[in-house]
Image (tube, rainbow, N blue to C red):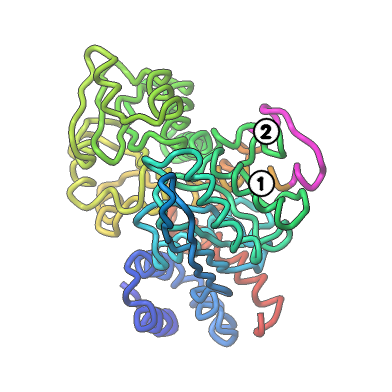
């Protein structure tokens, strides 16, 4: 519940202006609830309108994307790029291609990105973009033509020192390659304008693995410090089967855990013997199949229709890596009932506010997305550094830097939680630590910023 009068007033203004954007309102309210102790100590924030400015994007770009399918029929989608805050660096955040994409979804993701990027300690502002285009079922040629049409407009608004997009849901190496090729063609320049590129044209080793690996590095450090514990011997439930889920599974297994689930938008698999990751990689990365194929290929495993049931599988650690609001109150209660003691988020805002309340009231170690899944954008920042230097670092060098960043995010969040009077509440800590750096920069740059 909001109690600070300044915070309440600004949130009421957001509700009035953006009442039709529930995901954005949810993200803002969660952050504002954490920030009240910080705001109370800094009356200069109200005088300079810091909260009013941080919830209002610096620029919202919305555009038509017309492209031709394989039958010669013209298709029309909507494209978005929301450049939210550049106080500490160029806008940085992924592009999401999914039918659920709308302005409110992109705003919530961009707002979260401001604090997430701040936590990495790298000079990156917050932004996000995407389209309601669905690549599923489309040919490579159709995806290419869409990406080219999308970039034909987007290229006007981005640049190496202005806004550096990356991938997100349904935007992987194939899509980034098409987008980069079109940008280079139109702008006649070869620059680090996109991250997540192929290794042959400026990409970084470990970028594909980064979000999943980083999630486990963060979780491991939090467990070590707060619980004197580790992944060793633990049973882990993971949702999703994209890059984040796959490489979180890989790293959790390397750290001694047994991962027993994976899912997609149709259902989930349960393998009591532990997920065979090579099979999942072949299905999802090899031929973009459905996760139910796993049960057809691996004896002893089970496939269940629907995604919610994955949270009923007993576990020690849950790593949601699919999409926003995938864990509601009932699912969180099912996790508690199944013995779960740690929830760290690989997806963006995968837990509803009611679910988070269940975690905190039951003593679960909760790592919020903006901290726990920052490994992807952190490594994108490292890719930007390599592009600027015209160098490529080894996998081990990038992975070592990633591990250090993720452990640093945990410690910054923990220290901020102590300063805010909520020791061990990593959600409060992440919000406060991320916000303070951005607010300080905004004040330094003047109120016209």
Residue 26 visible to the viewer: yes
Q: Position of residue 28 (x, y in %)?
A: 41, 69
Tell me the crowding category of disc 2: few under 14, some 14 to 19, or many 20 or more residues within 10 angstroms, Cα based. few
Q: Earlier in the sequence, mark 2 or mark 1?
A: 1
Q: Which residue does the numbered mark 2 point to in the structure image?
A: 199
Range shown magenta: 385-399
Q: Nearer the viewer, residue 294 or 111?
A: 294
User: Residue at image x 43%, y 18%?
Assistant: 278
User: Residue at image x 24%, y 18%?
Assistant: 296
Q: Position of residue 52 (x, y in %)?
A: 50, 81
| Principal secondary structure, stretch drawn in magenta | helix
Residue 386 belongs to the span the image colors magenta: yes
Q: Which residue is at the far bottom?
A: 47
Residue 368 visible to the viewer: no
Q: Position of residue 199 (x, y in %)?
A: 67, 33
Q: Secondary structure at mark 2?
A: helix
The image shows residue 356, relative to residue 382, as above or below, that is: below
Q: Which residue does the numbered mark 1 point to in the structure image?
A: 181
Quadrant for residue 49, please give it: bottom right
């Amino acid at each position: 519940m909001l109690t600070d009068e300044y915070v309440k007033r600004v949130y009421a203004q957001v509700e009035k202006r953006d009442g039709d954007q529930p995901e954005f309102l949810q993200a803002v309210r969660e952050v504002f609830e954490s920030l009240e102790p910080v705001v109370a100590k800094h009356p200069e924030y109200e005088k300079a309108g810091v909260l009013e400015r941080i919830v209002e994007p610096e620029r919202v770009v919305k555009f038509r994307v017309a492209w031709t399918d394989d039958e010669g029929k013209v298709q029309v989608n909507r494209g978005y790029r929301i450049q939210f805050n550049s106080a500490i660096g160029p806008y940085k955040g992924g592009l999401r291609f999914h039918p659920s994409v709308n302005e409110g979804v992109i705003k919530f993701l961009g707002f979260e990105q401001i604090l997430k990027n701040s936590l990495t300690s790298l000079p990156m502002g917050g932004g996000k973009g995407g389209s309601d285009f669905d690549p599923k079922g489309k040919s490579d040629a159709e995806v290419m033509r869409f990406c080219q049409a999308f970039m034909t407009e987007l290229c006007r608004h981005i640049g190496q020192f202005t806004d550096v997009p990356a991938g997100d849901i349904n935007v992987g190496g194939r899509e980034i390659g098409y987008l980069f090729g079109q940008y280079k063609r139109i702008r006649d320049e070869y620059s680090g304008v996109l991250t997540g590129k192929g290794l042959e044209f400026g990409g970084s080793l470990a970028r594909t693995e980064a979000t999943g690996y980083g999630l486990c590095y963060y979780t491991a450090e939090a467990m070590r410090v707060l619980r004197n514990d580790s992944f060793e011997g633990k049973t882990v439930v993971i949702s999703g089967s994209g890059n984040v889920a796959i490489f979180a599974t890989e790293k959790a297994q390397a750290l001694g855990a047994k991962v027993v689930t994976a899912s997609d938008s149709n259902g989930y698999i349960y393998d009591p013997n532990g997920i065979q990751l090579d099979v999942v990689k072949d299905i999802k990365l090899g031929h973009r199949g459905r996760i139910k194929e796993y049960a057809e290929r691996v004896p002893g495993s089970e496939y269940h229709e629907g995604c919610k049931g994955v949270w009923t599988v007993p576990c020690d650690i849950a790593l949601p890596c699919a999409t926003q609001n995938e864990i509601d109150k009932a699912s969180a209660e099912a996790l508690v009932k199944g013995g779960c003691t740690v929830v760290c988020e690989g997806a963006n805002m995968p837990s509803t506010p009611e679910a988070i309340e269940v975690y905190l009231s039951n003593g679960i170690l909760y790592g919020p997305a903006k901290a726990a899944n920052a490994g992807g954008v952190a490594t994108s920042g490292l890719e930007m550094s390599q592009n600027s230097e015209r160098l490529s670092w080894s996998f081990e060098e990038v992975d070592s830097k990633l591990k250090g960043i993720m452990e640093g995010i945990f410690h910054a969040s923990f220290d901020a939680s102590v300063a805010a009077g909520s020791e061990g509440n990593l959600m409060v800590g992440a919000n406060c630590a991320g916000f303070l750096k951005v607010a300080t920069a905004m004040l330094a740059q003047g109120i016209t910023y």
